[in-house]
């Protein structure tokens, strides 16, 4: 029996696929979405692949949330790789096999055809697996429509660039008190006013955001949250970023929350963090996630970091699909 494809318009399809996948993998399924959570995501439908052994993969079509986008967004997944991640606790680090790639191409082509049937002119997607998606884009004739962000890196050869200004950087205590959390609330609200970060932060939400205790011991050997303080004294930080260190000696900084610091000052804070982590945690490599933020990008460049990964959004014009 060959792998068969079906197109399912059920708004709760993501919950159903998750339950089916978890049952096959022998793990507890997640709590189902309440009140049509999938529908809130704008699920237009999903191409589902099933074979003799059950679920093989899927490609979900999501309504565009940006009015400038020309069509729906696609998210694909392979059941085998998803199951490996569920069992191992982390996404598997491997390439797709030729057979897996052939299945991905097949379900994405079918999803594109369904999007065209629904009246759309294009299909967009962000990579699930970088190399697989780059190969897929080439096969389908898709182009890079934009970048959602980049990963910047500093390896063992990195040295602090000359000329960075002196800055005041403090490390957040393990248990921040209410007064400190209130300054973070003000920072987060200011950042949210200019970004998709929300403006209704309170102390408990900030405390939860900063809590990384859910990460396993392999992913959280060390941790530090750095505050770039204003030049004129204490008060609300100009920027904040949290760095987690894994068991391989790689430090990873996530979202930089800020309220318009000078890029050179933020560069100085990044350099302070790298140097401090090397001394305290034995860090060999430093990664910074930059979410298409001009201030953070300029600071990373000024701090001597280099782009090591780009996060493209591909666009496929449906009338050009073979």
Image: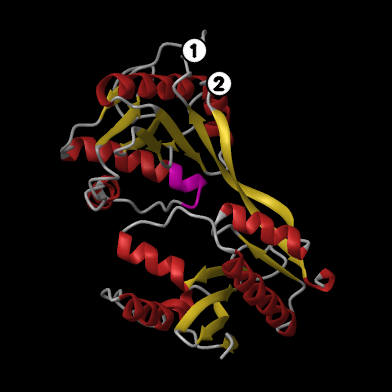
Is residue 181 visible in the rendered image? The answer is yes
Residue 56: x, y in percent?
Answer: 50, 78
Cα separation, mark 2 vs mark 1, equals 8 Å
Query: Of label 2 and label 1, which has the lower sequence position?
Result: 1
The residue pinned by badge 2 equals 302
Q: Read off the magenta span.
A: 191-196
Q: Which mark is residue 141?
A: none
Residue 103 lies, with reference to residue 6, above or below; the image says above
Residue 136: x, y in percent?
Answer: 68, 61
Residue 317: x, y in percent?
Answer: 78, 67
Q: Where's the N terminus, which quadrant?
A: bottom right
In depth, the one of 264 and 84 nearer the eye is: 84
Q: Residue furthest top?
A: 163
Assign the magenta stretch its main secondary structure.
helix
Is residue 74 visible in the rendered image? The answer is no
The residue pinned by badge 1 equals 164
Residue 167, picture quadrant: top left
The answer to whether the residue labelled 2 contacts the one labelled 1, judged by CB atoms less than 8 Å apart, is yes
Which type of secondary structure does the marked residue at label 1 adopt? Answer: loop
Say if the magenta span includes residue 194: yes
Residue 232, picture quadrant: top left
Residue 112 lies, with reference to residue 273, above or below; the image says below
At horizontal 49% and vertical 73% (from top left) the residue drawn is 41
Say if the magenta span includes residue 172: no
């Amino acid at each position: 029996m060959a792998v068969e494809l079906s197109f399912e318009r059920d708004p709760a399809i993501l919950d159903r696929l998750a339950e089916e996948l978890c049952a096959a993998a022998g793990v507890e399924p997640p709590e189902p979405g309440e009140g049509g959570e999938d529908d809130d995501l704008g699920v237009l439908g999903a191409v589902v692949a099933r074979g003799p052994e059950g679920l093989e993969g899927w490609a979900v079509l999501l309504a565009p949330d940006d009015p400038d986008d020309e069509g729906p967004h696609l998210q694909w997944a392979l059941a085998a790789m998803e199951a490996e991640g569920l069992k191992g606790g982390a996404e598997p680090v491997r390439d797709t096999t030729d057979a897996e790639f052939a299945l991905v191409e097949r379900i994405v082509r079918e999803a594109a055809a369904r999007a065209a049937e629904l009246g759309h002119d294009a299909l967009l997607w962000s990579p699930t697996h970088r190399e697989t998606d780059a190969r897929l884009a080439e096969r389908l004739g898709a182009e890079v429509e934009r970048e959602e962000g980049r990963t910047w890196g500093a390896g063992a050869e990195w040295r602090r660039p000359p000329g960075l200004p002196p800055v005041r950087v403090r490390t957040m205590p393990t248990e921040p008190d209410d007064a400190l959390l209130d300054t973070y609330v003000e920072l987060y609200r200011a950042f949210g006013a200019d970004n998709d970060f929300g403006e209704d932060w309170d102390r408990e939400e900030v405390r939860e955001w900063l809590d990384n205790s859910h990460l396993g011991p392999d992913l959280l050997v060390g941790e530090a949250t750095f505050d770039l303080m204003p030049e004129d004294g204490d008060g609300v930080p100009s920027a904040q970023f949290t760095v987690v260190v894994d068991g391989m000696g790689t430090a990873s900084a996530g979202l930089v929350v800020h309220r318009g610091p000078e890029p050179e000052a933020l560069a100085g804070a990044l350099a302070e963090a790298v140097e401090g982590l090397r001394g305290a945690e034995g860090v060999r490599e430093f990664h910074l996630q930059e979410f298409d933020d001009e201030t953070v990008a300029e600071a990373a460049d000024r701090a001597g970091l280099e782009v090591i990964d780009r996060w493209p959004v591909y666009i496929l014009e449906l009338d050009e699909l073979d």
